[in-house]
Image (tube, rainbow, N blue to C red):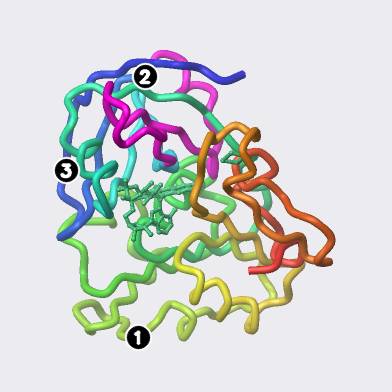
Amino acid sequence: MIFFETGTVLKRETFDSDKLLIKVESDQIWQKARPGQFVEIRVNSRLDPLLRRPFSIAFTDESSIWLLIQIKGKGSKIIANSSQLEIMGPLGNGFPELENVSLVGGGSGIAPLIFYYKTYPDRVKRVYFGFKTKPNFNLYKLIPQKKLVLVTEDGSTEFRGLVTQFIECKNDVHLVCGPTPMMKALNKLISSDKLYFSLESYMGCGVGICMGCAVRKGDGNGYYRVCTEGPVFRADKILL
Ligand SMILES: Cc1cc2nc3c(=O)[nH]c(=O)nc-3n(C[C@H](O)[C@H](O)[C@H](O)COP(=O)(O)OP(=O)(O)OC[C@H]3O[C@@H](n4cnc5c(N)ncnc54)[C@H](O)[C@@H]3O)c2cc1C
Ligand code: FES
């Protein structure tokens, strides 16, 4: 079931130079959402920008959801500065519930993986998060240091480089969300039946009508809609 809610923004925390975590009041979505699902947010009451914008649920609290918003363009900037948000969700399929998984995220793609970790901490062996530079936000507040490998391109954390350089157990199932080059690199490292990607495609309607979010099927025969059949796909089911 999809809920339409208007929630007050209760808290804002700086994450890094272009991202912030926001906590939004929620009536039903926080109770129903599963890790890997997302919400569509109306930007404002005007016609420009017209389309709602999709954001993963980063985690939930009692009567609220948290979102990690990266400011990319007009929509995300308005959303990040709003005091109330019109939210539709939860949407999409979410991650499969598996044991002994590793999580791999880059940039704002860490959001649905935080939710997975917070929901199933005992099922997660390792978490690899990659950024250009160390975030201002202390991620160890959400994921313990013994499980989190925080990789930065500029070496501002202990692990310098790209997340793909630090993956230890290539035979484990990996749940992934982040930039396409990172997903392509993982496709070469890990068997595609052990790899699940959450895609952050461009979206139109968000509910399966417009085909604006289509991704090619792995066998090349037709398309999946990321908003309804996804956003999470096993790697061999799609062509990146
Ligand atoms: C299922 C899903 C979950 C998502 N979760 C998050 C999240 O948790 N946090 C987050 O910050 N973002 C997330 N996104 C991406 C987010 O929806 C877009 O960044 C946002 O819609 C951009 O809107 P805008 O109006 O600010 O930018 P626009 O003005 O629409 O575009 C600004 C720039 O960003 C680029 N852009 C726009 N949309 C995307 C996209 N989907 N992927 C790559 N580049 C894009 C455009 O090409 C342009 O260069 C998610 C997307 C999907 C589909
Ligand atoms: S965004 Fe319209 S079908 Fe997916």
Residue 147, above or below 40: below
Instruction: Name the residue at 55% across, 50% down.
Output: 122
Q: What is the C-alpha distance between the residues marked 2 and 1?
A: 38 Å
> Which image quarter is the C terminus in?
bottom right
Res 13 label: 3
Question: Residue 116: percent from the left, percent from the top?
Answer: 51, 47
* Residue that mark 2 sits on: 26
Going from N to C along the chain, the mark reached first, 2 or 3, is 3
The kind of residue on which mark 2 rests is Ser
Which tag, 1 or 3, sits closer to the chain's start? 3
Amino acid tagged 3: Glu
Of the numbered discs 2 and 1, the one sitting upstream in the chain is: 2
Residue 125 in magenta? Answer: no
User: Is the residue marked by circle 1 packed among few (<14), some (14-19), or many (20+) residues within 10 Å?
Assistant: some
Q: CA distance from mark 1 to mark 3?
A: 26 Å
Pointer 1 residue = 161
Mark 2, Cα crowd under 10 Å, few <14 / some 14-19 / many 20+, is many
| Residue 203 spot, x, y in % from top left | 51, 45
